Amino acid sequence: MNIAQTFDQWIDRRGTHCAKWDTMETHYGVSPSGGLAMWVADMDFRPPACVQDAVEAMAAHGIYGYFGDEQASNDAIRWWMKHRHGWEFDEKAIFTTHGLVNGTALCVDAYTKPGDGVIVMTPVYHAFARIIKAAGRQVVECRLANVDGRYLLDIAGWDAQMTGNERMLLLCSPHNPGGRVWTRDELREIAQFCVRHDLILVSDEIHHDLVMPGHKHLAMPVAAPEISDRLVMMTATTKTFNIAGCHSGNVIIPDEALRAPFRARMNALGISPNSFGMAMATAAYSPEGAAWVDDLVSYLDGNRRLFDEGVDSIPGLRSMPLEATYLAWVDFSGTGMEPAEFIARVEKQAKIAASHGATFGSGGASFLRFNLATQRANVVEAVSRLKDAFADMQ
């Protein structure tokens, strides 16, 4: 396979009900005609052929009834987690949700009650806070320490911050938007923090397959197997294979007793699998899918290096070193500008739609998040536009 040719192919997503391209003018004032969509966390690449083949087989059959028998899907999930992440578990631990935002909401609903505190390590994926607030729970922001442009834990500070009202911690591993791959020691520190404060730990590991060369992701149950009685794992094919529209996520709960309240909420809300999502996920978690992911990560790493080199050459801008994900987290604090000014330059002058850092919580206001999972020509163009927009800084 020629990796560059595969991922460099331009696919026009405009006019296809694509959130990333078709709604960016509404959200950012950046027209899809001439603008660059670098906000929503999906990719501008087609998934591997095995996924497309599965969809085409369903279309050829022509009947789209209720889905039954999750054995093949469960086998594929367990195969993937064993061979790619070194974790084995009982198939009874697997629940299929309508994506991991849905999975997170179900966890909040199943394991906490209104008024309880739910901890997030900020800045972090903005959907966490949105779900917590909508459920009538309290968002507890435990801020990450930004040390020389890299996020570190502040466990001692978090310990002092606890009030006893907290019931759950939502972990983003690898971290979005900072791109950190947490080390074994860091994961164990987080696990012991949860033990000390009697917290359910929900580990959202949706980016765990998108890890840059030289870094190694550890699944939480591999790093800290002793906390399985309070651990909920969340994984998915959707981010890895660019099939988010199939709305399928894996909530994996190793402890049998911990499964009961989650199962009860699933049943109470009438949640059942999406047949297209099940077929696509089963096809993706395969040797063919694995080979495609390896090629994808190699291409993303090239985009990362090109983007970071270009952005870091602009005085006042600094891209946080990206260890995982395809989401560059750029700090504009060195420009001395208020967020409104640097955002206006990016959106009005550079015509780039990037996610506003303030939406990720405390510590994010001086940042913008740029999605690099697009054709390399778009990354080259984005760097050029940013250099022009901040030319007076050079």
Image (cartoon, grey):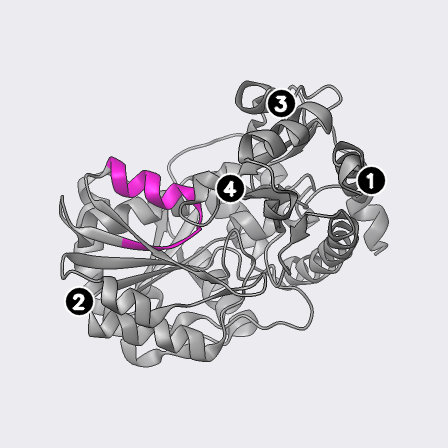
In the visual, does 273 lie left or right of 166?
Answer: right
Q: What label does residue 377 carry, if any?
A: 1
As shown in the figure, which amino acid type bears the numbered disc 4? Gly
Instruction: Tell me which label, 4 or 1, sits earlier in the chain.
Output: 4
Q: What label does residue 357 carry, if any?
A: 4
Q: Residue at x 53, y 62 (%)?
A: 208
Residue under numbered circle 3: 16
Q: Residue at x 54, y 30 (%)?
A: 62
Residue depth check, mark 4 versus mark 1: number of the one nearer the observer? 4
Secondary element at tag 3: loop
Q: Is residue 277 magenta?
A: no
Instruction: Tell me which label, 1 or 3, sits earlier in the chain.
Output: 3
How many numbered markers are drawn?
Answer: 4
Residue depth check, mark 1 versus mark 3: number of the one nearer the observer? 1
Residue under numbered circle 2: 257
Instruction: Tell me which label, 1 or 2, sits earlier in the chain.
Output: 2
As shown in the figure, which amino acid type bears the numbered disc 2? Ala
Q: Is residue 130 magenta?
A: yes
Secondary element at tag 4: helix
As shown in the figure, which amino acid type bears the numbered disc 1? Ala
Foreground pick, 333 / 300: 333
In the visual, does 117 lie left or right of 51?
Answer: left
